[in-house]
Image: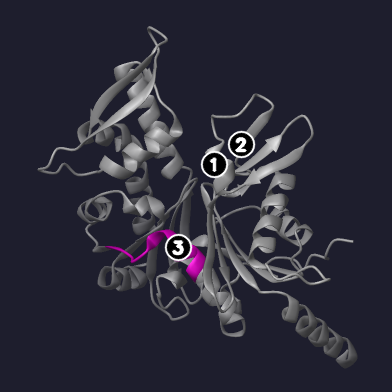
């Protein structure tokens, strides 16, 4: 047994010389990669462009996103993750391989074999966990660890998750909203909601189609959300032009929408998120709730940047709500901190079977 352990240590040291261990926030909308000792080195859309005639991957990340809606019928720009879980195994594997190779720009005779930590939504099945592990191993990882996104986000927000005290996280990503209460290095109560950034974009598309008979693209909807989206009326009126195809005439048209329009469009999904937060608060044990009332709710993820969302949550739930600094990178930073301190923080990782590397 001792000889086997020594061989593993030698093998780890060998591969660590050629590889940078990495942590990946594998998101529905975008993926961030944290390299050990370097910080976040990649922040790219989770989009892959594929030639359906040949099966060839043409572009990944930023280059692939530029192709969305602008390609011939046989070239498809697709997202390999739906609601934070793998929907296309082979394309996810290609994307992970791209990230690993991009981090390792040095040229050696041997390929990089890093240890990889991947963020996953709370409550995914063992089959979904295995799909992520298999994809990462096939992409070149020698060892794969999984961490639930609410836990990674809390660590990224520098909360004391290993102590006996309540921590409340609301992580609004691209595909899912994760609401969780954490204590003693584990998740006490959590809810995962398929209502987040992508759903908000679709809400705007649907509203403009219904009210103005104009069909707009996802990119235009996202820009409207970012630039003038809000959840509480403000004194200053904001407007943005939107271009699309008029569904009555079939011709191109430009309209101007206001922040009031966008607020109406987002109202239903925002209410769903508030209801999920209230439900989680109601189920939280009194001792932990007392801690949360003192510390407050911590808002992370790109969706948390929606104007005045922290204020609205505070008004509705009656608990102080804090939008953390740089909420978009919270999960990646948290997973990165675990990577840097793997021995001390190993207990926060999600349990998963030790899968054998590919042949």
Considering only vertical position in the picture, is 245 above or below 337? above
Dividing the picture into quarters, in which one does residue 161 lie?
Answer: bottom left
Q: Which residues are magenta?
A: 322-333
Closer to the chain start, of discs 3 and 1, is 1
* Residue that badge 1 annotates: 65
| x 77%, y 78%: residue | 15
Q: CA distance from mark 1 to mark 2?
A: 7 Å
Residue 149 placed where, x, y %? 52, 61
Q: Is residue 329 magenta?
A: yes
Tell me whether circle 1 and circle 2 mark residues in contact (CB < 8 Å): yes
* Residue that badge 3 annotates: 329
| Total tally of numbered discs in the picture | 3
Residue 249 placed where, x, y %? 38, 7
Dividing the picture into quarters, in which one does residue 208 lie?
Answer: top left
Visible residue check, residue 32: yes
| x 37%, y 65%: residue | 168
Residue 358 placed where, x, y %? 85, 61
- Residue furthest bottom in the image: 2
Residue 218 placed where, x, y %? 44, 33
């Amino acid at each position: 047994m001792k000889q086997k352990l020594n061989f593993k240590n030698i093998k780890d040291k060998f591969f660590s010389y050629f590889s940078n261990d990495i942590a990946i926030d594998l998101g529905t909308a975008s993926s961030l990669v944290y390299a050990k000792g370097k910080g976040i080195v990649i922040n790219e859309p989770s989009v892959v462009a594929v030639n359906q005639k040949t099966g060839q991957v043409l572009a990944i990340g930023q280059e692939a996103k530029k192709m969305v809606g602008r390609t011939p019928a046989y070239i498809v720009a697709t997202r390999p993750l739906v609601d934070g879980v793998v929907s296309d195994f082979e394309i996810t594997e290609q994307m992970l391989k791209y990230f690993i190779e991009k981090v390792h720009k040095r040229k050696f005779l041997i390929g990089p074999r890093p240890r990889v930590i991947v963020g996953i939504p709370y409550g995914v099945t063992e089959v979904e966990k295995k799909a992520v592990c298999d994809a990462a191993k096939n992409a070149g990882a020698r060892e794969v660890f999984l961490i639930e996104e609410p836990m990674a986000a809390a660590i990224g927000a520098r909360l004391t998750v290993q102590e006996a005290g309540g921590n409340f996280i609301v992580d609004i990503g691209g595909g899912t909203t994760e609401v969780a209460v954490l204590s003693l290095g584990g998740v006490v109560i959590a809810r995962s909601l398929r209502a987040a950034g992508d759903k908000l974009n679709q809400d705007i598309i649907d509203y403009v189609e219904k009210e103005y008979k104009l069909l707009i693209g996802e990119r235009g909807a996202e820009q409207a959300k970012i630039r003038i989206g809000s959840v509480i009326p403000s004194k200053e009126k904001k407007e943005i032009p939107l271009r699309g195809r008029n569904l009555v005439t079939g011709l191109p048209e430009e309209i101007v929408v206001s922040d009031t329009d966008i607020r109406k469009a987002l109202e239903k999904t925002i209410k769903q998120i508030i209801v999920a937060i209230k439900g989680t608060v109601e189920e939280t044990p009194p001792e932990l709730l007392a801690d949360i009332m003192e510390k407050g709710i911590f808002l992370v993820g790109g969706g948390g940047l929606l104007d005045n969302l922290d204020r609205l949550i505070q008004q509705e739930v009656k608990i102080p709500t804090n939008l953390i600094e740089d909420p978009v990178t919270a999960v990646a930073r948290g997973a990165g901190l675990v990577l840097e301190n793997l021995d001390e923080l190993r207990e926060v990782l999600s349990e998963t079977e030790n899968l054998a590397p590919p042949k």
